[in-house]
Image (tube, helix red, strand yellow):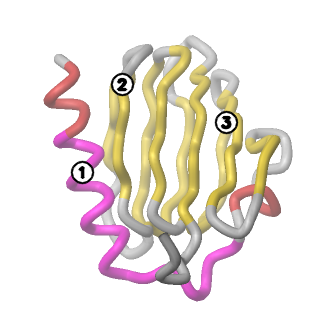
C-alpha cells in the first residue's frame, strides 16, 4: 500500500469517528498509559510519543484535532466509535492530519509502531 492510500484510508477512519463526537471518550493517556507518553503540554498543544508493541491495544479514547508523524512503520487496526474496524499500513515518515476523533486501536503487525502525536487544543483567537 503506498503512502497516499494509507493517508486516504486513515482519512476515511477519521471522518467516521469524527461524526460520533469526542465528549464521552476518555483521554488516551488515561486509557493507555503504557502506550501514550506525553512530554510537552501548554495551553495550545500537547505532544505525545505513542508506542504500540506487537499485539498492544488501546480502548476507546478521544483526540482533538491532531497531527501524527510516524517514526516506526507497522500495521494498526483502528475502530472508530460506532464504525467498522479498518486496517492501516503505516510507513516511517508518514504525516497524517486528523480532525477530532473517538476510536480504539490495536497493533496487528509483528513490528513496534511508534509515532509522535501533536494534539491541538481549542484556539483562543489570539495570533
In the displayed structure, does residue 109 sit left or right of residue 91? right
Counting residues from the N terminus, which is met first, the one under dot 1 or under dot 2? 1
Give the number of marks.
3
Q: Secondary structure at mark 2?
A: loop
Q: Which residue is mark 2?
A: 94
Query: How far from the left and from the top, in percent, is residue 3?
Result: 22, 22
Mark number displayed over residue 11: 1
Give the CA distance from mark 1 to mark 2: 13 Å
Q: Nearer the viewer, residue 123 or 30?
A: 123
Residue 62 to residue 55: above or below: below
Counting residues from the N terminus, which is met first, the one under dot 1 or under dot 3? 1
Determine crowd level at label 3: few under 14, some 14-19, many 20+ residues with C-alpha closer than 10 A.
many
Query: How far from the left and from the top, in percent, is residue 37?
Result: 80, 41
Tell which tag, 1 or 2, sits nearer the viewer.
2
Residue 3 to residue 124: above or below: above
Q: What residue is rendered at 58% in x and 70% in y? A: 121
**Quadrant of the image containing the N terminus:** top left
Q: Which residue is mark 3?
A: 50
Q: Secondary structure at mark 1?
A: helix
Query: How far from the left and from the top, in percent, is residue 87?
Result: 33, 37
Q: What residue is rendered at 17% in x and 42% in y? A: 8
Q: Secondary structure at mark 3?
A: strand
Give the CA distance from mark 1 to mark 3: 19 Å
Give the CA distance from mark 2 to mark 3: 14 Å
Determine crowd level at label 1: few under 14, some 14-19, many 20+ residues with C-alpha closer than 10 A.
some
Q: What residue is rendered at 42% in x and 56% in y? A: 79
Which residues make up the magenta segment?
A: 8-26
Q: Quadrant of residue 42?
A: bottom right
Amino acid at each position: 500500500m503506498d503512502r497516499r492510500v494509507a493517508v486516504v484510508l486513515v482519512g476515511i477512519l477519521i471522518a467516521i469517528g469524527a461524526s460520533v463526537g469526542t465528549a464521552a471518550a476518555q483521554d488516551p493517556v488515561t486509557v493507555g498509559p503504557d502506550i501514550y507518553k506525553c512530554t510537552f503540554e501548554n495551553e495550545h498543544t500537547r505532544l505525545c510519543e505513542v508506542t504500540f508493541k506487537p499485539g498492544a491495544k488501546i480502548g476507546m479514547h478521544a483526540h482533538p484535532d491532531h497531527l501524527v508523524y510516524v517514526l516506526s512503520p507497522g500495521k494498526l487496526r483502528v475502530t472508530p466509535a460506532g464504525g467498522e474496524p479498518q486496517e492501516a499500513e503505516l510507513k516511517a515518515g508518514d504525516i497524517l492530519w486528523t480532525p477530532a476523533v473517538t476510536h480504539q486501536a490495536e497493533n496487528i503487525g509483528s513490528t513496534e509502531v511508534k509515532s509522535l502525536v501533536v494534539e491541538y487544543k481549542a484556539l483562543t483567537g489570539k495570533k
